[in-house]
Amino acid sequence: MKIINVKLDEVKIGKRYRTTNKDVIERLKSSIKEIGLLQPIVISKDKDLVAGFHRLQALKELGYEEVPAVVCKEDTEFFCEMEENFVRSELTTLERAELLKTIQDYIYDHGKSREEFFEYAREKFGLSQTQIYNYLLVAKIDPVEKDKLRNKDLSLKQLVRIAKKVKNNKKSDIDDKVKLLQEMLGFKSRKALMEYLVQQALKDLGIE
């Protein structure tokens, strides 16, 4: 990884960066005027913007022509972007949880182990094992429930409480359905019902 000065108009901005937060840009402009740019933007070797869209916009509005940029290698672009986004102050706790889940999926998809993911999260973000578990639990909240929480300023502790409640409600709903099925088919125990359902599934698959 190296840092270079690059002309602002040479940085290529993807479609996903079209939405701007004016308040963030104004805060950045004030900070840059007072103490300069503290953190470089992040670009690929082809000068595609990986992270730092609002910093770039603030510099443009201030009349800057060049910006210091960290150049990420191709195989680390994903992590550069994720790490940059995770520490952004404007992210909600729910968004951080979803981001950590995205990182976990990426690491697993590339053949890495659970231990390697946890080590990465601890080293890069300073998270404890419990915090990692809690973020991942929050990330698994049902999408419909998530949409209800999206614009609320909730702490990790509050979201974990909600996630556990939703999970317990789902478990209770499943238990009720299993009990109903058990009664309808005349099985005295859940174990007998499960054995029957497994046998039926095997038969449907042609496995006797």
Image (cartoon, rainbow, N blue to C red):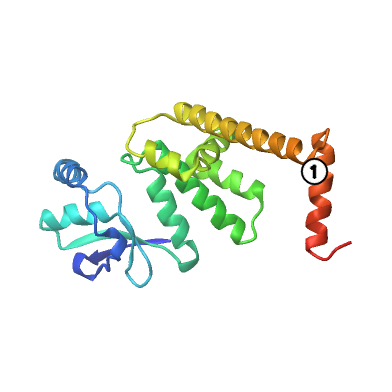
Classify 11 as above or below 118.
below
Q: Quadrant of the N terminus?
A: bottom left
Could you tell me which residue is drawn at 63 percent across and 34 percent down? 171
**Horizontal relation, residue 203 to residue 23: left or right:** right
Q: Residue lying farthest bottom?
A: 46
Question: How many labels, in total?
Answer: 1
- Residue 153, relative to residue 48: is it above or below? above
Residue ID at (54%, 41%):
136
Q: Relative to 103, is 192 above or below?
A: above
Q: Give the percent coordinates (x, y) of residue 205.
A: 79, 64
Secondary structure under the numbered disc 1 in the rendered image? helix
- The quarter of the displayed image where residue 91 is located: top left
- Observer-nearest of 126 and 191: 191
> Where in the figure is residue 176, as x and y percent of width and height?
65, 33
Q: Position of residue 32 (x, y in %)?
A: 18, 46
Most foreground residue, 182 or 137? 182
At 65% from the left and 60% from the top, the residue drawn is 111
Inspect the image, locate mark 1, and give the three-letter code of the amino acid beneath it: Met
Quadrant in which the C terminus is drawn: bottom right
What is the residue that sits farthest to the right in this orientation?
208
Horizontal relation, residue 123 to residue 192: left or right: left
Q: Nearer the viewer, residue 108 or 190?
A: 190
Q: What residue would you read off at disc 1?
A: 194
